[in-house]
Image (cartoon, rainbow, N blue to C red):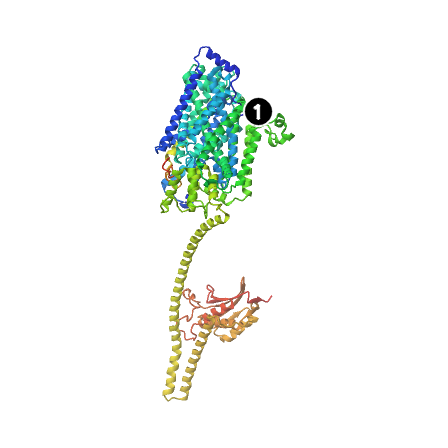
Amino acid sequence: MQSRPLRPIPGPVRGAISDAAAAGQAMLSFNLLIAVSLTYVAFLFAVAFAADRDAKRGRAGWVHSPLVYTLSLSIYCTAWTFYGAVGYAARSGMEFVTIYLGPTLVMVGWWWVLRRLVRIGRAQRITSIADLISSRFGKSRRLGVIVTLMAVASGTPYIALQLQSVTLSFGVFSGTGDDGDPYSMAVWVAVGLAIFTVLFGTRKLDANERHHGIVMAIAVESVVKLLALVAVGVFVVWGLAGGPAEVLDMIDDATLPEWDLRPGRWASLIFLSAAAFICLPRMFQVLVVENADERHLSVASWAFPTYLFLMSLFVMPIAVVGLNLMPEGANPDLFVLTLPLSQGQNGLATLSFLGGFSSATSMVIVATIALATMVSNHIVMPLWLAASGGEGPVRSGDVRSVIVLSRRLSIAGVLALGYFYYRISGGGSALAAIGLVSFTGAVQVLPALLGGIFWRGATRRGAAASLIVGFSLWVWTLFLPSFGMGAILPETVMQNGPFGIGWLRPEALFGIAGLDPLLHGMMWSLALNAAAFFVFSATSFPTPMERLQGAQFVDVYAHSAQSGAWLGSAATAEDLLIMSQRILGATQAQALFQAEAAAQGKGGYLPDVTQQFVQTLERELAGSVGAATAHAMIGQLTQGANVTVEDLMAVADEAAQILEYSNRLEAKSAEQARTARALQDANEKLTALSVQKDAFLSQISHELRTPMTSIRSFSEILRDEDMTATEKARYAGIIHAEALRLTRLLDDLLDLAVLENGQVQIYRQTGTLSDILDRAVTAAGVPRTKLKIERKRSREDIVLTTDLDRLAQVFINVITNAAKYCDAPDPVLRIVVRQGGSGHTVDFIDNGSGIPVVKQAMIFEKFSRLGGESREGGAGLGLAICREIMERLGGSITYLPGQGGGGFRVVLPASIALAAQ
Amino acid sequence: MKSPGTNRFLDRPAYRQRRLRDAARMLPVAGAALWMVPLLSQVDPEGSTGAAGSMIYVFGVWVVLIVAAGLIARRMRHDDAESPPAANSGASPGGDQ
């Protein structure tokens, strides 16, 4: 902006205007203009008063309409934009529009940031942008002070700019009048604004910091300024240029090389204005603090862009027509006024003047309120609290009056600062340059603001570093140079850097020269600001209060209500009531306490001091004096029963316990389901077992009965009858054989029982497989004619370490089985030894018909016999015993199908088999 | 109640609302992109392209954005779970304001 200063009217032009007046064009009398302005101000007073009165009577419906909200946002369009936009367009073409495009994008994208800000603002009773930052980062007083100072530093020049524009516009009308003392006019304007602001801005300490009267007055003013600009625009387009087509032609003809869009500036100015729209204290005031209903945002999302659209639609035409019609060297910043005036349109010029006046006054009023609230809440009140010592808020007397007084003084102070700034800077080009510079200063809050509401990892140190770095860089690269070469920074510093350090030159930091100064300052300050924010946040650890607040801000949609800030409060209800009365006022405080007591089921005014109540109270107070101060006041009463890490852990523990409990419940129910399933399985098994047992018992009794029956009958024959010796011998032989069979059966049963119970003793010996097979074949005692056995001895040279007798028993069993059941006419049993991956396998394969598939699953069960009741002896326990033995030995025995005959495979694991080389 | 994730499959109206919010989120992105377009056309070495063309373009995009935002705002419901119930503005119990 410095390259394109808003120029004060040069002497010759003033002369030209005066000449025009002198030439007989009816010039508005200066006094008449003053009268019009005063009437207008009186009208605004009336509007504000009416709105306040109606709000007080509860008939505030029309004040709370989305339309009024939208119109109140228009304080974004200050006198700088009302007058300056045309001048800007005359110098730089379409670039002026960037100032409106940024806010349009923010409004249209309200779902991203504004909705969140408004929600947080309502939930936390935020009173200003400093309050938001301070509250987010653990109700830090220091951060509040930093943001306040920054806001004052970047806002004061802007207020000065408005004073200048009002003074200038008066100067246009007064003709020669401005040769006298331009500052006296500024003084009167400042004083008038201070009175208005004090009257309507501090009438009460509204719980939500809303100012109905002022908002209404601003809405009226914004209508006036829109009407004024549109009226001038219509006059210019249809009255002077002859229609839109002609205007477009004129624009094309007037196009200068400087009007080309410069990409860097175009993009970054859109960004800058978008960011400033959120960060400027006065915009925050109307957007968030004065917002009565979140739904207004969605209306404003299209209505406010429409307003901006209309405000900027006629800027180019006015600029071009002004350049064509006005004398060479006329100040384009005042075309809005001088153009109608030069055409003798006094009424239109007056309207235009009122538009500019409205722009300036509404901006100053809101900016002053916003700044004064911040100064009062973050600087004056903490100082007062500290000065009044420990007795602080419970001391007798009315804190309300102190707060109101501090706020009034702050308003006066801010306006006085603005005036003196105007005075000292000389009101010239240096001041005009401040518009975008001021934006850049305000925008330094952006990283901390966005980081605070979107990122839980943002910490107080990060925010402080961000603000300090950004602010310092802004002061060095933009603010100080904005006063002009040599005004504050000596020329040598600008050229060569401080103390000759070249890379610290304000407009070429780190040696990067040649950039547009605004772009340069903005880029460095914001980039390093954001970097500092991130680095310091990421490397520091937040205090418990920060973490609590961080969670509440970032997860504002999840829970808008509770926070665990006060625990084990030591304050009595009476103390709290005394303090609240003095901040909120007696009626309101008593009503609050009474309502709380009633909610607790008690009569009277003194509810129990619950944690929840103290929080509610703190939030109410925060709406009046800001979060940090309210926190400090309650903190004094509760004697520092502040949140500690332990409390935080307790809160977290509670949540964790609930979570754990529900998890446990879930686990338990899953476990119960599993147990039930297991029980069911066990039950089924038991049933199956009992069926088996029954079958086993009946089987075994049958097996035992058969030999017993024959023994009994033959022994009866022996006892009863006479018989020959040969007969006796034969019967005794039968009895003997049956007894043997019985014994064998009992042996087998015993063997099986021992094996199944795992009581069997394993006697480990070492021998070769070949020896064991020899033994088994011999012991099986199968005659060669009945079963021919084929072996490959070379493969059987395997050393085994296991219970060799038991293994032999298995082999014998398999061999005798083959002998018994092989139904081939010429039975052959092949014994094949193979080395497998996990050990050795010994396959016994005969050339019979094998075992049918349906029975293969049965053969290892007890008493399962092939071919029904075989007289071959054996009770069908053999293979069951084999299976048990092999399991004890760590191996297995399975039926091996698909071998062209019956086949059994005995697996000897590697642990018991050692191949001999 | 954390709304994303709790209910993954919404009925048709709720689904529309979600997509409407997506549209509301996309709008500024689209606007920013569209407003960067005039930068691309500034390649005339003479540097004397008429400003009228870019002016009409910028204002045209503006109208489109306003209309789109208006349509979205009209259709958007506010009584959903994510928004608070109609805010009672005077939250303090004091009757004298």
Residue A831 point in image, percent of width and height: 51, 68
Which residue corresponds to mark 1? A484
Residue A456 point in image, percent of width and height: 49, 42
Q: Nearer the viewer, residue A340 or A484?
A: A484
Instruction: Give the residue at the far right of this rendering.
Output: A500
User: With A518 as the anchor, is A586 left or right in this view?
Assistant: left
Whether residue A453 is visible = no
Q: Residues within 10 Å of mark 1 (few under 14, many from 20)?
A: some
- Tag 1 subunit: A
Residue A355 point in image, percent of width and height: 43, 22
Vertical order, A826 against A610 (above or below)? below
User: With A690 as the anchor, is A908 left or right in this view?
Assistant: right
The quarter of the rendered structure image containing the C terminus of chain A is bottom right
Q: Nearer the viewer, residue A583 or A443?
A: A583
Q: Nearer the viewer, residue A884 or A589?
A: A589
Question: How many marks do you count on the picture?
Answer: 1
Whether residue A510 is visible = yes
User: With A510 as the anchor, is B65 left or right in this view?
Assistant: left
Vertical order, A457 against A834 (above or below)? above
Tag 1, which secondary structure?
A: loop
Instruction: Give the residue at the far top of this rendering.
Output: A23
User: Residue at image x 40%, y 27%?
Assistant: A217
**Location of residue A591 by image quarter:** top left
Vertical order, A245 against A704 (above or below)? above
Instruction: Give the residue at the far front of this rendering.
Output: A396
Residue type beneath disc 1:
Gly
Residue A871 point in image, percent of width and height: 41, 75
